[in-house]
Image (cartoon, grey):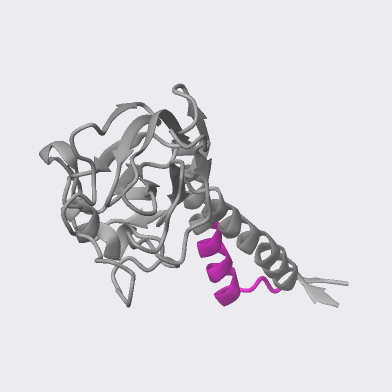
Amino acid sequence: MFTLHKMVHKAFSIVIPTVLFFSVSVHASIISVTETGGPSSMGTNATVIGAPANALDDIVFNTGMQGFNEAQGVFTSIAHGIDGGGTVATGSYVNSHMIFLNSQGNALLTHTGVQWTFDGNIIGVMSDSGGLLEAASTFELGNPLTNYTATFGGSGPAAPFPARGLEGGDSYSVSGNTITVNMRVTEPGDWIRVITVPEPGMLALMGFALVAFGLTRRSAYHPINAKLL
């Protein structure tokens, strides 16, 4: 014998975790990467990777530009500075991503015309030469599984440090949800943070999940007395 309350509660208990999981899992990510300028000077194509264990200059190396997703679905607790003197306002709902090129040793490595496309519009980039903007925002926008700050033997310095970001010979341009990046590195490498906003549909989905969760909570405290045989 089941009460209607139990049936409703059971139905919501199945649906809600699914909706909440889906709303988190679809948060903005790097959709694609294409190369209008071909592979890097070492013949390596740009790739999307999983978040590395470290984002320290003398630990993570590559021979072609790479990008990974950082913090996803963050309501910013402070205003974060971005290139051009602007800010991402306090309370903004954002996603963060990092793009980098970091050769091992002092050999010149270039990769140009690399287009990174996200599923949300780009609202800011942090690429200042010293990496000050990146370092100041990592506590909130960095990937929680990546070490950006704790140095150790042979790791090199943590941001900020001279030439962490872009310098002369490096550049980028933004159009909607796409950033085209040109990097030229010797030592150290180039690291930039890209901030995007989720599509409206994702926000609506999250709102639906929260409303449904509230209904579930209320149903637990206001059971329906009708019984079903």
Count of numbered labels shown in the rendering: 0
The quadrant of the picture occupied by the N terminus is: bottom right
Among the 4 quarters of the image, the one containing residue 74: bottom left
> Magenta stretch?
212-225
Q: Which residue is at the front of the view, 106 or 13?
A: 106
Locate residue 151, reporting x and y percent: 29, 74
| In the image, farthest residue toward the top | 36
Q: Up-down: is 31 above or below 4? A: above
Residue 87 located within the stretch drawn in magenta: no
Residue 218 located within the stretch drawn in magenta: yes
Is residue 18 shown left or right of residue 145? right
Locate residue 150, reporting x and y percent: 30, 74
Q: Up-down: is 119 above or below 58? A: above
Is residue 226 shown left or right of residue 146? right
Q: Residue at x 72, y 63 (%)?
A: 11
Q: Residue at x 18, y 45 (%)?
A: 128
Magenta stretch mostly in which secondary structure? helix
Q: Which residue is at the front of the view, 208 or 120?
A: 120
Locate residue 192, reporting x and y percent: 30, 46
| In the image, farthest residue toward the right | 229
Q: Residue at x 26, y 39 (%)?
A: 124
Locate residue 224, reporting x and y percent: 67, 70
The quadrant of the picture occupied by the C terminus is: bottom right
Q: Which residue is at the front of the view, 93 or 186?
A: 186
| In the image, farthest residue toward the left | 85
Among the 4 quarters of the image, the one containing residue 101: top left
